[in-house]
Image (spheres, coloured by chain):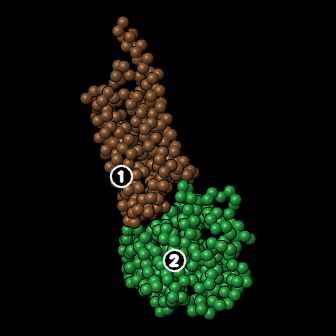
């Protein structure tokens, strides 16, 4: 079910990107507990704060991503979302100490302290990452009949990424690497994938133009 | 045949009677864990999670509540060989409140702050283990790390800090990092002592030692073969000399024997890391960035 003017590798590339965003979202969420613990403890309300912020951000991200996909959707813009996601993940590693310290001093109650710290650290990158799902659907769907199936495969891919991101981060990566190194890796992977998508788009566009010219003949 | 039956029956009856005698008098599921209090003849124990004897957090004899039952609680009193009379004491992790009660009896004028994350543990300690609070002894419901961070902001100082927040099967990982020990060190008075009750085994033992050494320099390990606990004793400044320790042993022997503590024999279990370095130089230090303590404890 390829669109006429679309490269054969475009859909697999979108699935790989969606998988990686799912992987990163849960990897970062899991490390959130580690990042907050020195200032706000490791009690159940820490997870309450983190999960609330992630769910809230994702829900807004879905809304914004869906809206954005109605305005001349392209692989270029899709790649740009990934680059922005990569950039906005970076402050989690760089500024978390400063941010948490000032919140810790201002707010005595560690429930609201951790909620505010989660907002400050994770809200923006998770909104951006949430935009990816609806945007992927827009790029993948070709017709009404198969749209449900396309969405199903997309959710399968990105949620499988989330599952693997959770287990690999918590079982293995924390044993080998510093928290910040893992966060920076996520940032680099997301940004690189964005660049790959944009480059892929550049490389395949002339090809498609040629094809279209050939069809016109 | 009948003889064998009688023997096996009597073994069975002993087996069952010991189970029946361990009577659970209180059990609840708190936000953090299962809490079980059971009575076995004269012995009352506080247990977390499972009903095996391994997980006992605190025990006392109902007929002689003053006498310390646990080996590690006795070992913790080696801390008194490091300092003169403590005036301010901080205990992270309440258990049955045994340490608080004993220290208050030894030094009624000392201010004791007990920090415990689980309010259910505090009320069980009050109801079943005789834990008491007064104008000098208080308990605070808070995560130990948060309490220490806030106390450091307020520039508070303690002469004796006891870290006893680990139970048999789970380590709060943010309480075993370089940054946490640095924050705790800020709370120590110039002559203050930090004592930690830990049970790390295998790989984690080395990581823990290396992390303490990175923050405090050389320290004392106190352990005997009775179980896998060890007590770590560290100070902000230099550790006391052997003569100083020996003179304190003399002063404390009678005072502590009332609580079942044989300080002379405990003194012989103290080893300095200057002579007994029990980790290799390339051991990775635990930090807020790298703190897989529970995973390391499995390996």
| Contact flag, marks 1 and 2 (Cβ < 8 Å) | no
Residue at 47% across, 81% down: B97
* Residue A153 visible, this orientation: no
Asked which secondary structure carries label 2, the reply is strand
Discs 1, 2: same chain: no
Chain that appears green: B
Q: How far apart are the alpha carbons under marks 1 and 2?
A: 35 Å
Residue B160 in the figure: left or right of residue A121: right
Residue at 37% across, 38% down: A132
The picture quadrant where one finds residue B118 is bottom left
> Which mark identifies residue A104?
none
Count of numbered badges drawn on the protein: 2
Counting from the top left corner in percent of width and height, residue B167 is at 50, 71
* Chain of the residue on which disc 2 is drawn: B
Chain that appears brown: A
Number of residues whose C-alpha sits closer than 10 Å to that of mark 1, classed few (under 14), some (14–19) or many (20 or more): many
Quadrant position of the C terminus of chain A in the picture: top left
Q: Nearer the viewer, residue A9 or B76?
A: B76
Q: Which residue is mark 2?
A: B90
* Chain of the residue on which disc 1 is drawn: A
Q: Which residue is mark 1?
A: A53
Counting from the top left corner in percent of width and height, residue A60 is at 31, 44
Residue B86 in the figure: left or right of residue B126: right
Residue at 49% across, 92% down: B64
Counting from the top left corner in percent of width and height, residue A32 is at 44, 53
Residue at 47% across, 53% down: A96
| Vertical side of A77 occupied by B175: above or below | below
Q: Nearer the viewer, residue A121 or B1?
A: A121
The picture quadrant where one finds residue B139 is bottom left
Counting from the top left corner in percent of width and height, residue B71 is at 58, 81
């Amino acid at each position: 079910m390829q669109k006429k003017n679309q490269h054969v590798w475009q859909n697999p590339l979108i699935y790989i990107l969606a998988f990686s965003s799912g992987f990163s979202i849960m990897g970062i969420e899991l490390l959130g507990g580690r990042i907050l613990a020195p200032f706000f403890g490791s009690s159940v309300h820490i997870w309450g704060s983190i999960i609330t912020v992630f769910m809230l951000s994702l829900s807004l991200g879905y809304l914004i991503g869906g809206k954005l996909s109605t305005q001349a959707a392209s692989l270029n813009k899709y790649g740009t979302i990934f680059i922005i996601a990569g950039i906005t993940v970076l402050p989690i590693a760089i500024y978390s100490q400063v941010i948490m310290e000032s919140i810790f001093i201002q707010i005595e109650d560690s429930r609201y302290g951790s909620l505010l710290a989660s907002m400050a650290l994770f809200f923006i990158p998770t909104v951006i990452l949430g935009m990816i799902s609806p945007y992927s659907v827009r790029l993948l769907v070709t017709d009404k009949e198969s749209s449900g199936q396309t969405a199903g495969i997309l959710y399968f891919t990105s949620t499988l990424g989330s599952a693997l991101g959770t287990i690999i981060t918590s079982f293995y990566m924390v044993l080998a690497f510093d928290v910040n190194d893992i966060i920076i890796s996520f940032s680099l992977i997301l940004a690189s994938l964005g660049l790959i998508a944009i480059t892929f788009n550049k490389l395949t566009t002339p090809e498609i133009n040629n094809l279209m010219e050939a069809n016109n003949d | 045949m009948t003889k064998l039956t009688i023997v096996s029956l009597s073994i069975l009856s002993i087996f069952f009677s010991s189970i029946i005698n361990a009577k659970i008098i209180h059990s609840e599921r708190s936000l953090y864990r299962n809490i079980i209090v059971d009575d076995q003849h004269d012995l009352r124990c506080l247990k977390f999670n499972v009903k095996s004897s391994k997980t006992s957090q605190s025990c006392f004899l109902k007929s002689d509540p003053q006498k310390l039952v646990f080996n590690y609680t006795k070992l913790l009193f080696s801390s008194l060989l490091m300092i003169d009379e403590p005036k301010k004491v901080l205990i992270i992790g309440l258990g049955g409140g045994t340490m608080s009660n004993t220290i208050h009896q030894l030094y009624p004028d000392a201010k004791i702050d007990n920090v415990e994350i689980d309010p259910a543990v505090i009320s069980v300690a009050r109801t079943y283990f005789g834990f008491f609070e007064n104008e000098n002894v208080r308990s605070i419901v808070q995560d130990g790390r948060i309490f220490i961070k806030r106390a450091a902001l307020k520039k508070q100082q303690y002469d004796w800090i006891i870290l006893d927040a680990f139970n048999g099967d789970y380590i709060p990982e943010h309480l075993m990092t370089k940054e946490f020990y640095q924050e705790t060190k800020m709370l120590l008075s110039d002559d203050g002592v930090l004592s930690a009750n830990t049970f790390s085994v295998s790989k984690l033992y080395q990581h823990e030692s290396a992390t303490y050494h990175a923050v405090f320099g050389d320290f004392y390990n106190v352990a005997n073969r009775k179980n896998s606990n060890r007590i770590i004793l560290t100070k902000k400044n230099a550790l006391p000399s052997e003569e100083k320790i020996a003179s304190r042993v003399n002063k404390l022997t009678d005072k502590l024997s009332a609580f079942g503590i044989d300080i002379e024999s405990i003194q012989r279990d103290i080893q300095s890391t200057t002579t007994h370095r029990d980790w290799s130089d390339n051991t990775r230090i635990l930090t807020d960035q790298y703190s897989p303590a529970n995973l390391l404890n499995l390996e």
